[in-house]
Each structure stands twice: as C-alpha cells, then as structure tokens.
Amino acid sequence: MEWWQIALIVVAGVGAGGINAVVGSGTLITFPALVAFGVPPVVATMSNAVGLIPGNIASSFGYREELRGQWRRILGFVPASVLGSLTGAYLLLHLPADAFETIVPVLLVVALIMVVGQPALSRYLKERSLRRAQESGIEAHVAEVGDPLGPGRYTLTLIVVFLTAIYGGYFAAAQGIILIALLGLLLPDDLQRLNGLKNVLVLVVNTVSASTYIIVGHDRINWIAVICVAVGSLIGGYFGARVGRKFSPVLLRSIIVVLGLVAIWRILTL
C-alpha cells in the first residue's frame, strides 16, 4: 500500500471505532476502504475483524458505568455469542469466495437499511422503555439485571444472540445495530444499558471470529491493514464512547450509506 492509503485506512479505523461505540456499523467504513484499495473481500473481512478488536475493547470500557450489574446477564449470553461467532467464521473460511461476493451485497443492503432506520427504531425503543418504567413504578435505568424473563423470552433472546453472532462471525457490518434493535424488543431495560451490553457481546463475537481467522487462516490476513485499522479503531473507540454522541447522527449515517453503496458497487464489479 502507498503511504496515503495507509493513512486513509487509519482514519477509516478511527471513524469505525467511534461509530461502533455509539451505534455500531463501523465495518461499513473500514470494509469499503479496504476493498477500494484492492484488498480482496474475504481478506478484507478477516483483516477488518482482527483490526477492530482494540476499538471494541475501548468502547466496552467506555460504557463500564452502564455495564454495572449486568455481568450475570452477560455471562448467560456469552456462550451463544461464542457458538454463533464460530459458526459464522467457519462459513467464511469454508464457503467459496464467490459465494461471499454473492451474499455480502445482500447483507450490505440489509445493514444499510438498518442504519437508515436506526433513528426511528431508537426512538421507539426509548419510548417503550419509558412506558415500561412508568407502568412498573421504577426508573428503567435502575432495573436489576436479574429482571425475570420467562423461559420462552429468555430462550428467544438466546436464539437472537446466537443468530446475530453467526452474522457477525461471517461479515459483521451493522451487527451492533441489529443486535441492539432485537435486544431492545426482548429485554426490559434502558437503551444505554443495552448499548453497553451490545458492545460487550460484539467484542466477544469479533474476538472469537478474529482468533479463528488467525489460527486457521492467518495466511489470508493482510497484516498491514490489521495494524492500520487497529490503531485507528483504538483511538476512535475510546473517544467515540466519550464524545461520539455529540457528532451529528445524520452526518455519520450519510457517510456510512455512501461508503456502503461504494462497497456494493466495488464487489459487484470485481
């Protein structure tokens, strides 16, 4: 890579780390950037997953206040995230590259729809959380994590976490948005606490899938890209968790949509 390409990938990593901390879908910045600079799609996905780990750690740490009291819940969901991530990573490593190039444009379209619809969904989830709090006579943000879920709802939540982890292990773009949307419909909790939970589960998924890629497909990883994305995502993840909410959501979503469309075009013309 040329020096300016390396610099732009680092900048893309900063953006991805910051966006992942706040809403998710940072992969829609780094993945198109890597593909645009000639990195094959499967290699770009694997390299991007490894490189985003520092940003995932930073954003999870940034939401440590929202994670208080949630660890029993998290431990219950982690096995589903691990199994789903392993399944998605297996599919990525064993399905032919042309299958990936056929499937990913569809996944990108789904991810972009989720990005565009995220504001309305967030408003709905916030209003729903407030209604639940008013009905129960307590503040939503002080709800205990052990909030009793019936066996049916808990099983459904585990299935959702598992399926989202498969998606994340295979491609990852907008998995955070998809996950928090579904968790918000199933769990009686404050949206910010759910965002902290989402960050940890995404960290688990990306760590497991990245570890699988390194162990099984290390020869298919572009390590220059990994380093660039890692440096950028670490910076972006830290500051995104602290000040990312001050950025214009419209601007962020516009950038994501444009880059996502570029990635779709780039893959379809390979």
Image (cartoon, helix red, strand yellow):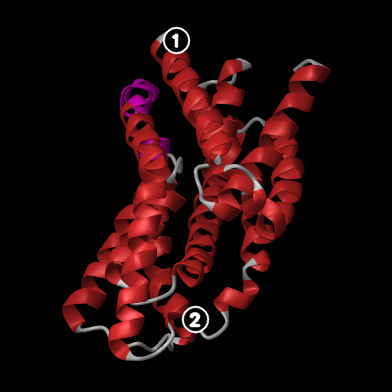
96 drawn magenta = yes
Q: Which residue is nearer to you in this view: 266 or 92?
A: 266
- 165 is higher (above) or lower (below) than 260: below
Q: How many labels does the image show?
A: 2
- Cβ atoms under marks 2 and 1 closer than 8 Å: no
- Locate residue 160 relative to residue 189 in the image: left or right: left
Label 2: few (<14), some (14–19) or many (≥20) C-alpha neighbours in 10 Å: some
Residue 60 seen by the camera? yes
Could you say which disc has been placed on residue 70 in the image? Answer: 2
Label 2 secondary element = loop
Horizontal arrangement in the rendering, residue 212 relative to residue 52 (left or right): left
What's the amino acid at mark 2? Gln
* Amino acid type for the residue under numbered disc 1: Leu
Label 1: element kind:
loop
Q: Residue furthest left?
A: 152
Q: Give the range drawn in magenta.
A: 91-105
Q: Where is residue 2 in the image (x, y as percent from the top left)?
A: 79, 15
* 224 versus 201 height, above or below: above
Which residue matches tag 1? 270
Closer to the camera in the image, 251 or 218: 251
Is residue 87 at all visible to an observer of this figure?
Answer: no
